[in-house]
Amino acid sequence: MLEPLPCRLRSAAIACLVAPLLLACQTQAHRPEPAAAEPFSLRVLHINDHHSRVAPDNGGSLRLDGEPTDVSFGGFPQLVSAFAEFERGADNLLKLHAGDAITGDLYFTLFHGEADADLMNQVCFDAFAVGNHEFDAGDAGLKRFLDYLSKRTWDCRSPSLGANVEPEVGVSPLARFDADDYLLPHVVLERGGRRIGIVGIDVAVKTKASSNPDAGTRFLDEAATAQTQIDVLRAQGVDIIVLLTHVGYRADLELARRLSGVDAIVGGDSHTLLGEQFGRYGLSPEGPYPTRLANADGDTVCVVQAWQYTWVLGVLDLRFDEAGRVLSCEGTPVLLVGDDYRRHGEALAGAARERVLRAVQSSEVLRTFEPDPHAERVLDVYRNQIRTFTGEQLADVPQRLCLRRVPGSHDRSRDGAPGCAESTDAQGGDAQALAAEAFLAQAQRFGGADLAIQNGGGVRNGMAEGAFTVGDAYLSLPYKNTLVRLQMTGAEIRRVLEEAVDYFIRDLSANSGAYPYAAGLRWNVDLARSRDEGRLSGIEFWNGEAWEPLDESRTYRVVANNFIAAGRDGYASMARIEESRREDTFLDYAQALVDYARQEKVLRRPEPGRRSTQRFRDLDGRVYGPPG
């Protein structure tokens, strides 16, 4: 049940004054020694970062029966069945979503969160923490999504949490009357006679810099806010505390060590695959599931994350003593796979298929579930509309255009399809490079441009070999961005590229989407240098006939998406370009790719010599691309 709270306090000091029986206020929330009692068991089922990818994803690849095998992953109908399976036999259960539910797929582009909400309500999450991408369409866009999420309140309520998010009261649509109109700092749930506090934390700097919250919406320090909320809950007698975070795995580990009174952290944002068992299937997990650490009190805290999209369901089993200390945490991350096994584009059959089936059936971490019929019907309502819109073929892709945000070894979001590592290690993503080429070509429709700059994270999907459709274009470029033309000097271009690389290097996993791509421009990058020394060198401009050094005194016409043109993702100097040198073309950036593909008929990997990054030296001194 959802326990009503008399007031939703954001200050531990205030909480100490009004807490029942004037409980002592402690910033270091030490617990009493436990009395002998039966341990309390709690199962937590969780997902994160589904990014509107509500249908099964056909782009999965695993090593099965000793060979690379293509297979579909996830989809909400299978996920709903998985939740139901792991709910059975659990006396005390929580179902949690750690943020970034929306944006990233046509299901958001066309339905603005309604499809996500309808399918999330088939699970009926006990709590949902907002992530940075929940703000991509501003506070109003998040309000619209949360309204969809709450429209089935008679049988499902999913509280939305954001303790460190403070919308401007009376101005933000999220806070017409009170800061907690839509976003609660925490919620207290009762399971098996025990009270469990769940605190929602969003990534602060990244949301403000790389999404589109309203100007008056504040994002507070994650650790300080989390400790305040833990202290509030402890003062109310709540002794089991779960943080539901959207700050990334590495930041979660740091929170776990710094905070007092936290028992478990269920996270998102970094799309981290945990579970060392996955290594045998050709995947690259970043740590154990769960990851066990000691908090500031020296007590066990368990950290988990469930990769991305609807591919993995995290199943975390916790046991607590009478005082709320963690006695044990065990669990299994379950990768949901279809039964559509393929190799070299052909469906597996006969003995080969049987061997693969046995490999999946014997696995601890791979499962195939019969899709939930009701969720399938809900999905079909939206899927049929998308098929009508997206079916038109625009071009042919003779060789997969791989997704990769950053060259070298630091990018954990690289495309796992066969051959993609070789394609993208040296010069980054094929899909990002092609998008920049498309924007430059389509700039001719509004008077032309000399070069295009695009952030790596603005391209969200690779382009599969075969037919390229309208739907594929919007899947690759899912945001509601437009193309902006800027008049920039060569010095300003150099400065903004250095800014983008510097923003990326501050947090190699969380800020990888800032890494720059360009058409008509190329450079070398050395991450071992400081920003003052200049990490970019050899910047050259394509003049239509040959490469020439970038002239810092010359003015160039630069086309970019309106997101980075507003200074987001670290591109601060673009925001300082005055209005007289700025023109929004109002051309949808995905539509620019549609028109480019329709015109070209064949989409090929850009030639190496025309890639933006020519040589890349990583922090470990490894050089990718031609040495120099």
Image: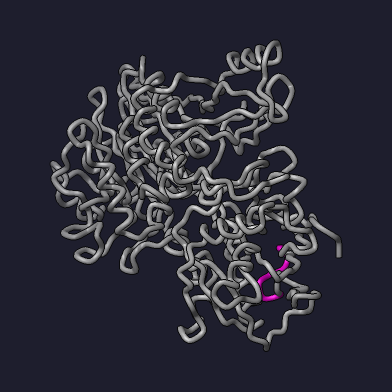
* 39 left or right of 69 in image: left
The answer to whether residue 544 is above or below residue 267 is below
Q: Which residues are magenta?
A: 527-533
The answer to whether residue 128 is above or below residue 373 is below
Across and down, in percent, residue 565 comes to 51, 71
Q: Residue at x 24, y 29 (%)?
A: 190
* Residue sitting nearer the eye, 438 or 188: 438
- Which colouring convention does the figure follow? one colour
In the image, residue 528 lies in the stretch drawn in magenta: yes
Across and down, in percent, residue 185 comes to 28, 49
Across and down, in percent, residue 192 comes to 25, 22
The answer to whether residue 586 is above or below residue 259 is below
Numbered circles on residues, count: 0
* Residue sitting nearer the eye, 440 or 195: 440
* 474 left or right of 20 in image: right
The answer to whether residue 558 is above or below residue 317 is below
* 149 left or right of 397 in image: left
* 541 left or right of 568 in image: right
Q: Residue at x 29, y 34 (%)?
A: 196
* Residue sitting nearer the eye, 149 or 1: 149
Magenta region's main secondary structure? loop
Query: Which part of the image, by quadrant, shows the N terminus?
Result: top left
Q: Is residue 280 visible?
A: no
In the image, residue 404 lies in the stretch drawn in magenta: no
